[in-house]
Amino acid sequence: MELLQLQYFQVVARLQHITAAAKSLHVTQSSLSKTIQRLEEDLGVPLFDRTGRVLRLNKFGRAFLNRVDKALFELAQGRQEISDLSSSESGSVELAVTTANSLTQILQDFRVRRPHAHFHVQMLKTEEMLEPLHRGEIDFCLSSPPIHGEDLECKIIALDSFVLAVPKGHHFVDRNSVSILELKDELFVGLKHGYSTRDLTDRVCQSVGFTPKHVYEGDEPARLRSLVEAEIGIAFIPETSTWSSSQEEHVKFLRVEELKSMREIGLSWHRSRYLSHAALDFRKIVLEYFKGLPREGNHSF
């Protein structure tokens, strides 16, 4: 049994399709099929039920995948630990986030403290984070809602509410707050369905009898302010994202009476994952950043 066989098996088990797995692994389908067949011959049992190129894990495959995941996870931790010990001044951090709003200052602080460290950030939906977190591909998940699990540690680092971003020419510009019902005839720019900001604010609006009219739906939260400034529409923005930088000249933020303390922001990591010195420093910077944010109600608009 070879390590490469286990790595290939893990990918095939995850995708359950030879063509997709071969493409992901950058190998030919025939080579991949032969590798899986040799693994099954070594084990003496089939791991998949096959229908053409579509595979389904059988009871042997599910049991074996559980062991393979744990074995490859431990090997990855060992590789990371050795790398950290051999070059403690560098190190790396793998981060997944549901929003990039708070990242700029955090990454700047990390660069100052760890100028030779590497980091990689990917934006995922909350439900997309669990699998790579359990496979040991991610050090931390910064998310709302927070991610919890039997093998996970989760620290709630902030309670966030939402504010309304309007352009300076908007008829609400002289207001400091609005109610949800006043927004039923407005045009919105926002994130796609599936992002917590969108789903939470949609539910609150629907609770008073309307669904927000979106003229733009995207997956880049940082773009929303520029769209508001261009008067394309108004937007619900997490309040924490307005604290990390000065307010734009052409955008004003208003409190929304029904959107106070709407969500928790959590930092999650795998309890068994080895965390490099760089990763530990990164976690400390994240906690310091959110601890230093103004408390709800202390931010002026």
Image (cartoon, rainbow, N blue to C red):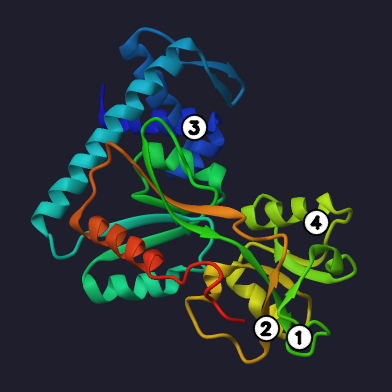
Above or below for 243 versus 85? below
Q: Secondary structure at mark 3?
A: helix
Q: Are marks 4 and 3 in contact (CB under 8 Å)?
A: no
SS at circle 2: strand
Q: Is residue 207 visible?
A: yes
**Residue at the spot 68% in from the left edge and 64% down from the top edge:** 218
The answer to whether marks 2 and 3 mark residues whose Cβ atoms lie closer than 8 Å is no
Q: Left or right of 38: which side holds 50?
A: right
| Three-letter code, disc 3 | Arg
Residue matched to label 4: 205
Residue 39 drawn at (x, y percent)? 35, 19
Q: Which three-letter amino acid code belongs to the residue tagged 4?
A: Cys
The residue at which mark 3 appears reads as 14
Can the viewer see residue 115?
A: no
Q: Could you tell whether 184 is left or right of 159 in the image?
A: right
Is 72 in front, or is 138? 138
- Distance from disc 4 to disc 1, alpha carbons, whole Å, reads 21 Å
